[in-house]
Image (spheres, rainbow, N blue to C red):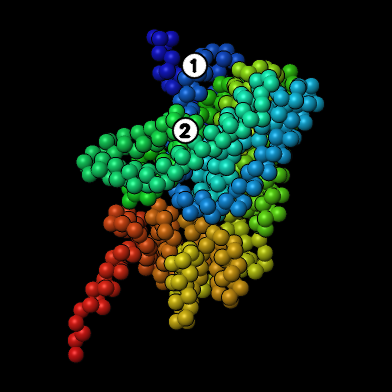
Amino acid sequence: MLHHSPLLSTIAVGLVAAFLLGYLGQRMRLSPIIGYLVAGLLIGPYTPGFVGDVDLANQLSEIGVILLMFGVGLHFSLRELLDVRRIALPGALVQMSVATALGTGLGLVLGWGLSGSLLFGLALSVASTVVMLKALEQRQMLDTRAGHIAVGWLIVEDLAMVVALVVVPVLAVDDVSVGEVSVNLAITVVKVAVFATLMIVVGRRVIPWGLARVADTGSRELFTLGVLALGLGVAVGAASLFDVSFALGAFFAGMVLRESNLAHRAAADSLPLRDAFAVIFFLAVGMLVDPRVVLDQPLALAATVVVIVVGKLAIAYVLMRALKYSRSMSLAVAASLAQIGEFSFILVTLGADLELLSPSAQSLVLAGAIVSIAVNPLLFSWASRSYRANDESGDHAAATVMSEATGHVLVVGFGRVGARVAAGLWAHHVDVVVIDDDEGRVDEIRALGHEAVLGNAARAKVLRAAGGADARSVLIAIPDPLNAGAVASRARKVAPDATIMARGHRETDVEYLEAQGADRVVIGVHEVADLMITSSLPRTP
């Protein structure tokens, strides 16, 4: 019966194997991802026993990429994306260029032609969306400054791959003119620009409005279906109409939905499916690898892994440090990029179809991917420990002293609202400790002679470092209700007697943030209206 149901058998056997081996890996204090990869290897075509359908697994893994990037978009605003452009844009382009050069050099040493070597190097230069996002989520770093930089870096790489997938087939044709390449590039840039404009200008109004109408029906399953239809529909539509990647389309869909007051509900409803399909992605990667490459080309494989892990980490770290970021943040961002994944597989498949890459090169890319994905959780765990320690204490001596304040006010976030709140309290000689994940802001506060802690306030350690257990009130000034809810929930546990106040934008934010532990939620339009009413009432003599 199983032979007549390849989809069902691949999913069922794959998930059971992934669960068992993932659980075993967790018990052995290893990342469950290693168990998922081994499970894929066991049900792949290169090992005896049951063989799953590789093509079906790859198609299902695409859904995982779409859902994960959709979820990231729900946590990301356009402003936050633009905030990291000064590091993400040059960082991604320089790292990809240097990593491509290293891979090209390795390909030439192995005796391949220039075209094949260039494509091999390009495949080693681009990080995996799924691996990076799972690493950031597991370490609760998605909403930190390092997480924002890593995601912005990933988006730039994604855009670069969109261009590469257009240019490579053109360059593979003999006697192609510069004019033809220029025209194809121009068409690609215009398509991406049109898609981005449509999503930002039209999508920001239509998508939240449409999902709100679905929510008004009161049907939970219709709402969940609407969220999935939105993420998958925009991703596939963007790929079909504008030739952008599934991942980029899904990211924009999530980012525009973030404007809706239903964003936190959409994120919660899509989480189980995101996790399930992420597992299928790792299964699909494991199924692609022929383990014989370890015996046939051990030195070439070792050199490939060195380029991916050591080379890419070193390049990103040096770039981050050159742009004056701390050692711990530089290491965390660099570690998150030290692997390859789905775009690398797309490139090697394209290279094989165009007869640019030899089977040997394809095997090395796939084997290098599985080794780097297996190593990355361990590498990132080590790097993120350094970053989390810096969240509490910072990289320099001025940041090593945790707050000893008691009965003080914690201000979380030092943006426009947080800075105004803190300044007002300082003017009234109130003891204030600010928590912010931007090093520049923290240094600025300390230079003024005030206390500040660098880190993500959604972590108990950071709250305790700021004297949260002894604070009389916690003022959460960050604008994103999802992040504010995570902070409120953690602050309620660390400081059960403190008064917690957060800011929201819509009525649904009040219900959500109060459920997470906030005592009061301030909505700007309400406060403005109340002030207008108060100022317009007749004064009593």
Image location of residue 279, percent across then percent down: 49, 31
Residue that mark 2 sits on:
242
Q: Is residue 164 visible?
A: no
Query: Which amino acid is tagged 2?
Result: Phe
The number of numbered badges drawn on the structure is 2
Residue beneath the point at 78% across and 23% down: 110
Quarter where residue 104 is shown: top right
Label 1 crowd bin: few (<14), some (14–19), many (20+), radius 10 Å = some
Of 483 and 353, which appears nearest the observer? 353
Residue beneath the point at 51% across and 50% down: 81
Tell me, yes or no, whether the two marked residues, 2 and 1, touch with CB atoms within 8 Å: no
As drawn, 312 above or below 76: above
Q: Is residue 534 shown left or right of residue 77?
A: left
Quarter where residue 365 is shown: top right
Which quarter of the image is occupied by the C terminus?
bottom left
Of 461 and 85, which appears nearest the observer? 85
Q: Nearer the viewer, mark 2 or mark 1?
A: 2
